[in-house]
Amino acid sequence: MTRNDARAAFAATGLTYADLSRDDLRALRNAIDKELKASDLIKGYRSDRAIRMVKWPEGWAAITCSAYYFEKREAVTLGRDGFIGFGGWADDKNVVPIIAGFLKWLDALVDRRRIAA
């Protein structure tokens, strides 16, 4: 699954940023964190606890990640223009757990919305 595949999966749900609450973004962070830790790709690979939100949902939000040799790099950014960034610093191998966490979160979110409807 590529970054563009993940963006297309989000678009296919019909969701917009306005549909995403702070709790939804926390769930996204937690899903990414679980995948990063399970990946064993980089020692200490994890999501950071803080979620940066600027004028959400009209603005943007960012979830960052850290490891033993770096701090606060992009995991997922939900951009003001609707673009979703996935680990812009990461190669295709190190971005896999970020995308996997995003897709698991997206599936769970859609399932919850379906049940609630």
Image (cartoon, rainbow, N blue to C red):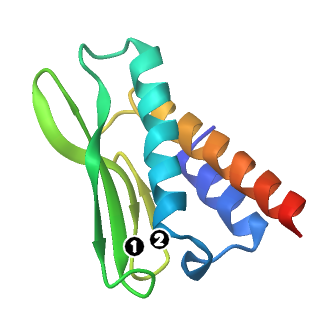
Q: Is residue 89 above or below residue 109?
A: above
- Marks 1 and 2 close (CB-CB < 8 Å): yes
Would residue 90 appear left or right of 30 to someone viewing this image?
A: left
Task: Tell me which amino acid carries mark 2.
Answer: Phe
Residue highlighted by disc 2? 83
Q: Is residue 45 above or below residue 26?
A: above
Q: Is residue 14 above or below residue 13?
A: below
Residue 33 in view of the camera: yes
Image disc number at residue 99: none
Instruction: Name the quadrant of the C terminus.
Output: bottom right
Element carrying mark 1: loop
The residues bearing labels 1 and 2 have C-alpha atoms spaced at a distance of: 5 Å
Q: Nearer the viewer, residue 85 or 19?
A: 19
Task: Tell me which amino acid carries mark 1.
Answer: Gly
- Residue shown at 13%/38% (left/top)? 71
Q: Residue 114 appears at what percent x and percent y?
A: 87, 61
Q: Residue 68 appears at what percent x and percent y?
A: 14, 20
Judge the density around disc 2: few (<14), some (14-19), many (≥20) Cα neighbours within 10 Å. few
Element carrying mark 2: loop
Instruction: Name the quadrant of the N terminus.
Output: top right
- Residue shown at 43%/46% (left/top)? 29
Residue 92 in view of the camera: no
Would residue 10 appear left or right of 13 to someone viewing this image?
A: left
- Residue shown at 49%/77% (left/top)? 82
Residue highlighted by disc 1? 79
Q: Residue 19 appears at what percent x and percent y?
A: 62, 76
Q: Nearer the viewer, residue 69 or 116?
A: 116
